[in-house]
Amino acid sequence: MSTTRQAEPAVTPPPASGPKANDGRTTRRPPARRLLARPEVGVFLGVVVVLVFFLIAAPPMRDSSSMANILYQSSTIGIMALPVALLMIGGEVDLSAGVAVVTSALTASMLAYQLSMNIWVGVIAALAVSLAVGMFNGWFLMKTGLPSFLVTLGTFLILQGINLAVTKTVTGNVATDDISDMDGFDQAKALFASSFEVGGVQVKITIVWWLVFAVLAAWVLLRTKYGNWIFAVGGNKESARAVGVPVNFTKISLYMLVGFGAWFVGMHQLFSFNTVQSGEGVGQELIYIAAAVIGGCLMTGGYGSAIGPVFGAFMFGMVQQGIVYAGWNPDWFKAFLGVMLLGAVLINLWVQRTATRR
């Protein structure tokens, strides 16, 4: 009689204690690497270097009134650099931003003066025109599929021609008439171009507006659904559209934000000088774009922050005023800007590679 032996079930030994295997995808990067991954880190380091340099080379910069002037110069760039940066994160550029500032100021000034109306009528009309220009840029871009470079270059040329031709036709000159004695001027000046004293130093109201807009832009980017849409359409608009992101609305609204910034800066210029030169604004769009790029925004879209352009604009203000305080030839300003731009791009590239290296 044979006996049958049943096979005993195999028992899997418990896994040995110790650290779990990791394929590298879930590795938590060190805090220093995570810090370097922030878009604004590179420009912050650059700001520190430039600030120390000018504090040594230009002793007048150490005065509090000098710093107030630097912040003022930075704010006039920074207010426009913020929406331009958001647009770049969204994957587009706007070459008409500089002349759009002048278009806004010309509209408010000439409309109110020629029709003898309260200046606020011109201010509101200028806002409508600026938003309409931004809406046209965004709508035409999405309708045709043309590169934003070409679309906004066309808008730049159109606005530049309109600024010169209409101003000469209406006023008989290349500049608008003085509006300082019109109804509503004092109230508008208080909002857009006033000053207040802090510790014996006159501080321009644009500095406050600049910081308020920066905080608001940072909150929108990091804490709202709209901020996620901006990054999504800048990274890959077709993928964003596939997951339900309203691509057309996002792009058009970003251009309208640039229009709002152009209106605000235009109103500041108008109520600071009481008149506007119709040929100004050409080349300023490159300053705004450069401030955003120096601030860590990529030209390819999908990457950047709202704080980086604040530092980028501050660096511009430091160089612009620092050259004057150092007693150097101001013709070197553009050369410094070019060096800063190339240096910032290299620093940002190094920071990104360092942050992503395992």
Image (cartoon, helix red, strand yellow):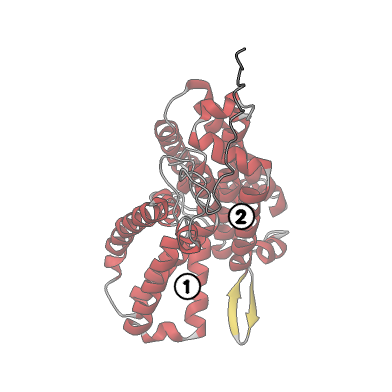
**Residue 27 image position (x, y, % from top left):** 50, 50
- Foreground of the two, 44 or 328: 44
Using the image, determine if residue 297 lies above or below residue 195: above
**Residue 166 image position (x, y, % from top left):** 50, 40
- Foreground of the two, 50 or 231: 231
Furthest residue in direction top, as rendered: 1
Q: Amino acid at mark 1?
A: Ile
Using the image, determine if residue 176 lies above or below residue 244: below
Tag 2: Cα neighbours inside 10 Å, few (<14), some, or many (≥20)?
some
SS label for mark 1: helix
Label ID, residue 70? 1
Using the image, determine if residue 245 lies above or below residue 197: above
Q: Which residue is mark 2?
A: 218
**Residue 76 image position (x, y, % from top left):** 52, 61
Question: Which quadrant of the structure image shows residue 225?
Answer: top right
Q: Is residue 11 left or right of residue 278?
A: right
Q: Quadrant of the N terminus?
A: top right
Give the mark nearer the N terminus: 1 vs 2: 1
SS label for mark 2: helix
Q: Nearer the viewer, mark 1 or mark 2?
A: 2
Question: Which quadrant of the structure image shows residue 5?
Answer: top right
Task: Say if residue 319 shows up in the picture.
Answer: yes
Residue pictured at 38% horizontal, 67% vertical? 46
**Residue 242 image position (x, y, % from top left):** 59, 23
Between the C-alphas of marks 1 and 2, the distance is 23 Å
Q: Amino acid at mark 2?
A: Ala
- Foreground of the two, 238 or 142: 238
Tag 1: Cα neighbours inside 10 Å, few (<14), some, or many (≥20)?
many
